[in-house]
Amino acid sequence: MTLAGFLTYALALGIAAAIPGPGVIALVARALGSGFRSTVPMLFGLALGDVVYLSAAVLGLAYIASTFGTAFMVIKYAGVAYLLWMAVSFWRKGVTAEKVAAQSAGDALSSFLAGFMVTLGNPKVIVFYLALLPTFLDLSTVTPVDFGVLIVLTFAVLVAVMIPYIGLAGRARHMLQSPRALKMLNRIAASFLAGAATAIAVRAN
């Protein structure tokens, strides 16, 4: 795979990642409700989910989407259930002024897993990689070096594209610290999370 191929792949992936979808909505909602720092693990989870699907495409395992359809359904609805749980939590209580800077240690793992499940809950991601990758390389002849570069490039591009989203949402959260503003913020975050869950649930497998 040539340098031009890698750069073209990165550009195409960056454009696709920047288009708001369930993953972006979930990240923004999390950042609005919990701040930038606690949302970063969720971003890493999302990116890792993409790497899993990228790996499946590169290794020629696209058939798992149909072979293990039940497993995908379980993962999909587990992600939906988690997002809905987060939405209900934000709607009922959410973040108070006292909690703006406070996050428990356990939040990092739950945030990471939420991001991972959001991506795995959308098997269409693998279709994107299957459609994109053959444009730049023959999947049957990909080398270990090509594979490694693609993994690093995919993770880096996704993080670079998503960081501004959660950064802006995190700043907006700190600008709205009055009880009334926080209540509105919690309701908005809850609505976004519920919207992301709905988008994942109604998508065809």
Image (cartoon, rainbow, N blue to C red):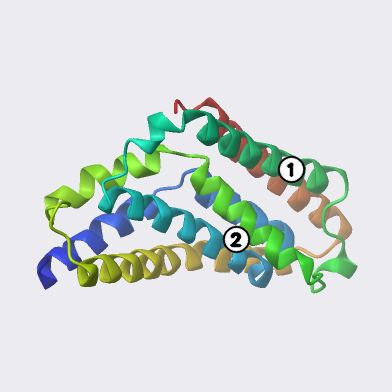
Side of 82 relative to 98 (left or right)? left
Instruction: Give the crowd class for mark 2: few <14, some 14-19, many >=20 residues within 10 Å.
Output: many
Q: Amino acid at mark 1?
A: Ala
Q: Is residue 195 visible?
A: no
Q: Residue at x 74, y 43 (%)?
A: 87
The residue most toward the front is 67
What residue is disc 1 on?
A: 87
Nearer-N-terminus badge (2/1) = 2
Q: Amino acid at mark 2?
A: Met
The disc at residue 201 is none
Secondary element under disc 1, as helix, strand or loop, is helix
Give the label, 2 or 1, closer to the camera.
2
- Residue 98, position as x, y percentages in the image: 90, 69
Instruction: Give the crowd class for mark 1: few <14, some 14-19, many >=20 residues within 10 Å.
Output: many
Q: Quadrant of the N terminus?
A: bottom left
Distance CA(mark 2)–CA(mark 1):
15 Å
Side of 41 relative to 99 (left or right)? left
What residue is disc 2 on?
A: 42
